[in-house]
Image: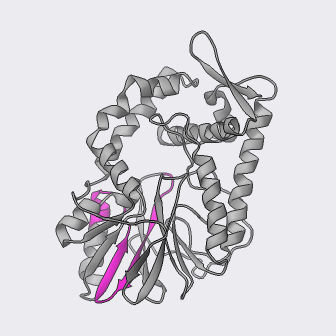
């Protein structure tokens, strides 16, 4: 995830989250479960939505023993005998899809995902060798990351397969613009790019419930990154378009139920905060590149001046490149490549 984003005053109906593994009702027929993560962003919010005789599960947490143990407790002790009905996955990141295979196999649940997220997860799981290819190494080295940092960041990529249990061979496709019926409620299916290629969100207009996944968070921006398999991508452009679409389509008075931080009221203000945050990041990059062209690695400490571990370095590098690619697309920066293949960006 990106750095903390200054937020205007939001309203938090539950200013204290449940303890890790704790389960509370955040809205009628909606349970909020918080699961621990072994990362700097140390939690993920899971929601259970009343679905007739049981509960539809929205995301799962990562595939580790601690997370499975929490789920065992929830399922045997806290749902009062009501079964699970369906599994909805918002996107392919392991803190969301991690236990999908375990849930679908153990409980016979139908898996619901967008097509792009399903296929992306399958590719990451079944083609891990691509994560260590020479083309991926060149991606980092050509943009100024030194050999040791490149090796460390690339080595992290293989951890993905250790954090998921895979996906079943059959799934139900969620398509933006269509509707999903859960119990007696009608949910509009939305999707947005930037953080993930086709992340799913759900909107119930009648009760003002907006399950925002990672797209809109109360205190931070989701990671908007460019990765080695698509080096010229413009995920920031996709993300900003998604925020504009959410402003047009989702009422301001909904209860936003995000996958991290706290549920909140004040959606449209938060959308403006996030747009302003990314505009300021672009301004910082433009200023840094005014004196002389810089590599992405040289721009990295401008946006992330604190010390970064390997996990954070990979995400920070991808985030800087996302802003640079967006600015190149807009004609604000230009890429120069020297005789050794090293790329630098400067003011156009």
Q: Position of residue 26 (x, y in %)?
A: 49, 83
Nearest the eye: 43 or 271: 271
**Residue at the far top in the pictured view:** 339
Quadrant of residue 185 within the rendered picture = bottom left
Whether residue 220 sits left or right of residue 55 in the image: it is: right
Residue 228 higher or lower than 61, as above or below:
above
Number of callouts: 0
Residue 58 among magenta residues: yes
Nearest the eye: 264 or 110: 110
Q: Position of residue 27 (x, y in %)?
A: 50, 86
Q: Position of residue 60 (x, y in %)?
A: 35, 65
Q: Which residues are magenta?
A: 40-68
Q: Quadrant of the C terminus?
A: top right
Nearest the eye: 305 or 81: 81
- Which residue is found at the position 34% from the left and 32% from the top? 130
Residue 264 higher or lower than 298, as above or below:
below
- Which residue is found at the position 23% from the left and 80% from the top? 76
Residue 6 higher or lower than 304, as above or below:
below
Name the colouring of the figure.
Answer: one colour
Quadrant of residue 31 within the rendered picture = bottom left
- Which residue is found at the position 42% from the left and 58% from the top? 91
Whether residue 276 is visible here, answered yes or no, is yes
Whether residue 242 sits left or right of residue 105 in the image: it is: right
Q: Position of residue 167 (x, y in %)?
A: 26, 56
- Which residue is found at the position 36% from the left and 87% from the top? 183
Nearest the eye: 263 or 245: 245
**Residue at the far front in the pictured view:** 177
Residue 251 higher or lower than 294, as above or below:
below
Whether residue 79 is visible here, answered yes or no, is no
């Amino acid at each position: 995830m990106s750095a903390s984003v200054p937020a205007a005053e939001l309203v938090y109906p539950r200013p204290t989250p449940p303890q890790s593994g704790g389960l509370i009702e955040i809205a009628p027929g909606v349970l909020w479960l918080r699961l621990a993560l072994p990362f700097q962003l140390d939690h993920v919010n899971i929601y259970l939505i009343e679905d007739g005789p049981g509960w539809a599960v929205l995301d799962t947490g990562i595939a580790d023993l601690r997370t499975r143990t929490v789920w065992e407790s929830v399922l045997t002790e806290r749902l009062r005998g009501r079964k699970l009905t369906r599994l909805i996955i918002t996107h392919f990141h392991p803190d969301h899809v991690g236990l999908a295979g375990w849930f679908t196999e153990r409980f016979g649940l139908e898996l619901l995902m967008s097509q792009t997220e399903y296929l992306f997860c399958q590719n990451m799981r079944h083609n891990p060798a691509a994560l260590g290819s020479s083309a991926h190494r060149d991606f980092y080295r050509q943009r100024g990351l030194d050999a040791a940092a490149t090796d460390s960041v690339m080595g992290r990529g293989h951890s993905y397969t250790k954090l998921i249990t895979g996906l079943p061979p059959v799934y139900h496709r969620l398509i933006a613009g269509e509707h999903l019926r859960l119990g007696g409620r009608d949910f509009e299916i939305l999707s947005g790019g930037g953080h993930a290629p086709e992340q799913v969100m759900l909107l119930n207009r009648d009760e003002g419930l907006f399950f925002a996944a990672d797209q809109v968070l109360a205190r931070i921006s989701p990671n908007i990154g460019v990765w080695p398999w698509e080096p010229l991508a413009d995920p920031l452009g996709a993300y900003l378009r998604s925020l504009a679409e959410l402003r047009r389509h989702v009422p301001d008075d909904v209860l936003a139920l995000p996958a991290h931080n706290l549920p909140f009221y004040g959606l449209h203000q938060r959308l403006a905060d996030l747009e302003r945050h990314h505009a300021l990041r672009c301004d910082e990059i433009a200023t840094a590149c005014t004196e002389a062209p810089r590599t992405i690695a040289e721009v990295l400490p401008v946006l992330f001046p604190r010390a970064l571990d390997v996990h954070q370095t990979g995400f920070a590098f991808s985030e800087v490149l996302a802003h640079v690619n967006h600015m190149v697309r807009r004609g604000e920066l230009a890429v120069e490549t020297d005789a050794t293949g090293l790329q630098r960006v400067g003011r156009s």
